[in-house]
């Protein structure tokens, strides 16, 4: 059995891995999709749909469960009591969906697969609300909206928030500032070197442009599409290096903005930075162990589910009772900075990795709601939107 297979078995046997998993193989359309609802204590699960050609089903399912868990933590931190969402009575749990396969560019076939997938989402009757992620787009959400109302990330002309990538990048910048203040006692990027893994991606490219405007010195690496990486590198004046060389670049901040699991036993010893803070999900291959490894090396690591929450915050504001407002949404995105200051301060006082602190804060919030629900003998405060 492969490592992924063993991990999958362990997660399937653990009662704490998720509340519900739905796996669908649609022979008619060729759709292979899984939906994982991790925890709905705080509200219906909210999470993107990732469309990616995982080599095996086990890898797809393991990644799906990890992503769903991180969404629970992300939303528990992002929608704190001080946010516009919480004050409006809106709160969410975590979930995620993964379509396994190469995203088809054939318009008719893509529409057929998306409609079949939307029917799966609709069958969950509001327990899971989805949006865009790697491999999916705002246009895909429009297609799905014709089948189910439980989608977000729609165009502004449809009352939506549009592509969440700018909000994700905006939140990463605020998180980076909290890290810069902690490590370098400055809130300025001027003269600071940032290495962006995935510089041509949706979030990486926006982040690169923002940091360049603020005077950062940039180093970047691309992925499959090297021409796109070269284009954005030329635009922002970044030094472009081969993907495997990005880890050993001398820099102040290493920003993982590609796929997950890139911070691991092989890459962490090669890092030459003081801070790791990026837009990718699941950056740590073995979260607690690798967070500790970074901490022991004197590297301040910004937990992904804290720093990259801007996108899901923006999407969540589509379900605000007053409708979507970018001003309200970005006011909540800015609070990523405040969360970071709290996490880093506790981490330093207790001499533990920020990841450990962030998980504890998220789980404490969930535990508190569960305790209140038990004491009152009613369901917890689960806001279920009437429409999306």
Image (spheres, helix red, strand yellow):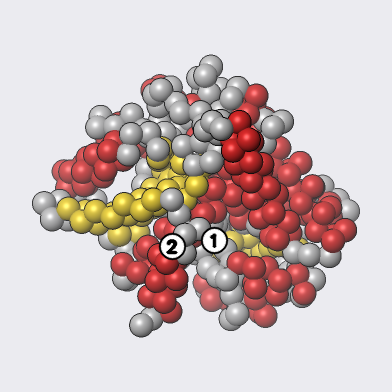
Q: Quadrant of the N terminus?
A: bottom left
The image position of residue 387, as x and y in percent, is 39, 24
The image position of residue 280, as x and y in percent, is 55, 57
Badge 2 element: helix
**Residue 177 horizontal side relative to residue 106, left or right:** right
CA gap, disc 2 to disc 1? 9 Å
The image position of residue 340, as x and y in percent, is 74, 48
**Residue 55 horizontal side relative to residue 77, left or right:** left
**Residue 75 horizontal side relative to residue 49, left or right:** right
Judging by the rendered image, the residue that carries numbered circle 1 is 282
The image position of residue 346, as x and y in percent, is 82, 54
Q: Nearer the viewer, residue 185 or 319?
A: 319
Mark closest to the chain's N terminus, 2 or 1: 2
For residue 56, above or below residue 365: below
- Quadrant assignment, res 381: top right
Q: From this viewpoint, which residue is outermost toward the left?
A: 28
**Residue 343 horizontal side relative to residue 72, left or right:** right
Marks 2 & 1, CB-CB < 8 Å contact: yes
Residue pictured at 59% horizontal, 49% vertical = 73
Judging by the rendered image, the residue that carries numbered circle 2 is 63
- Quadrant assignment, res 216: bottom right
Q: Is residue 91 visible?
A: no
């Amino acid at each position: 059995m492969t490592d992924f297979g063993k991990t999958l078995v362990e997660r399937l046997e653990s009662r704490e891995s998720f509340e519900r998993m739905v796996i669908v193989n649609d022979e008619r359309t060729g759709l292979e999709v899984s939906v994982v609802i991790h925890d709905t204590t705080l509200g219906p699960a909210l999470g993107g749909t990732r469309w990616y050609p995982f080599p095996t089903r086990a890898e797809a399912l393991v990644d799906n469960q990890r992503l769903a868990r991180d969404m629970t933590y992300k939303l528990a931190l992002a929608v704190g009591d001080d946010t516009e969402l919480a004050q409006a009575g809106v709160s969410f749990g975590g979930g995620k969906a993964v379509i396994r396969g190469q995203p088809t560019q054939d318009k008719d076939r893509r529409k057929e697969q998306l409609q079949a997938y939307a029917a799966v989402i609709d069958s969950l009757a509001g327990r899971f609300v989805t949006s865009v992620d790697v491999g999916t787009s705002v246009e895909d959400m429009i297609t799905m909206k014709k089948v189910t109302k439980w989608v977000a990330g729609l165009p502004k002309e449809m009352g939506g928030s549009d592509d969440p990538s700018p909000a994700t990048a905006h939140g990463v910048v605020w998180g980076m500032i909290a890290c810069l203040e902690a490590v370098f006692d400055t809130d300025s990027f001027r003269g600071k070197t940032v290495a962006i893994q995935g510089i041509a991606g949706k979030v990486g490219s926006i982040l690169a442009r923002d940091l360049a405007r603020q005077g950062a010195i940039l180093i970047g690496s691309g992925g499959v599409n090297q021409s796109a990486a070269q284009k954005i590198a030329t635009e922002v004046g970044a030094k472009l290096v081969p993907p495997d060389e990005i880890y050993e670049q001398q820099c102040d901040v290493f920003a993982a903005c590609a796929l997950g699991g890139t911070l691991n036993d092989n890459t962490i010893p090669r890092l030459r930075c003081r801070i790791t803070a990026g837009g990718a999900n699941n950056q740590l291959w073995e979260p607690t162990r690798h967070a500790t490894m970074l901490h022991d090396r004197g590297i301040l690591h910004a937990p992904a589910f804290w720093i990259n929450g801007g996108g899901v915050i923006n999407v969540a504001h589509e379900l605000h009772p007053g409708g979507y407002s970018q001003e309200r949404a970005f006011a909540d995105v800015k609070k990523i900075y405040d969360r970071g200051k709290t996490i880093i301060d506790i981490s330093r006082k207790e001499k533990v990795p920020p990841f450990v602190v962030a998980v504890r804060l998220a789980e404490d919030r969930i535990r508190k709601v569960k305790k209140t629900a038990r004491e009152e003998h009613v369901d917890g405060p689960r806001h279920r939107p009437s429409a999306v």
